[in-house]
């Protein structure tokens, strides 16, 4: 199945969740905000949010500085 991740096409297995995609990409969950098809998700939704063909996912990294 094909999805769009941060504007780039990507192939993933069927029934992949947001949480599984985060693990596959070796991202640090504590540093992320995620939008799925334009809707911001709460972290507790990641494991239940299944991806479908053509979905758009945006990963936004939170960086603290000073």
Image (cartoon, grey):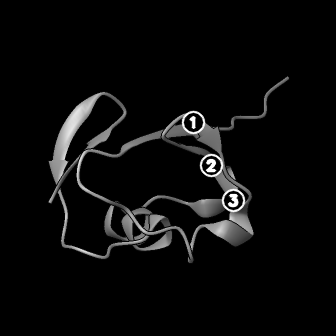
Q: Are marks 2 and 1 in contact (CB under 8 Å)?
A: yes
Mark 2 secondary-structure assignment: strand
Q: Is residue 2 above or below residue 37?
A: below
Residue 30 numbered mark, or none: 3
Measured as percent of width and height from the top left, residue 8 is found at: 23, 32
* View extreme (right): residue: 66
Q: Are marks 1 and 3 in contact (CB under 8 Å)?
A: no
Q: Which part of the image, by quadrant, shows the C terminus?
A: top right
In the rendered image, which quarter is residue 51 located in? bottom left
Report whether 17 appears left or right of 42: left
Q: Is residue 3 above or below residue 61?
A: below
Measured as percent of width and height from the top left, residue 36 is found at: 51, 46
Residue under label 2, please give it: 32
Q: Are marks 3 and 2 in contact (CB under 8 Å)?
A: yes
Q: Residue at x 25, y 45 (%)?
A: 54
Report whether 43 appears left or right of 56: right
Q: Would you call the spot at circle 3 few (<14 residues within 10 Å), some (14-19), or many (20 or more)?
A: few
Q: Would you call the spot at circle 2 few (<14 residues within 10 Å), some (14-19), or many (20 or more)?
A: some
Residue under label 1, please give it: 60
């Amino acid at each position: 199945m094909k999805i769009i991740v941060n504007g780039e096409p990507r192939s993933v297995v069927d029934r992949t969740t947001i949480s599984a995609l985060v693990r596959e990409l070796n991202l640090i969950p504590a540093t992320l905000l995620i939008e799925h098809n334009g809707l911001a998700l709460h972290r507790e939704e990641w494991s239940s949010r299944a991806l479908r063909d053509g979905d758009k996912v945006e990963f936004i990294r939170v960086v603290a500085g000073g």
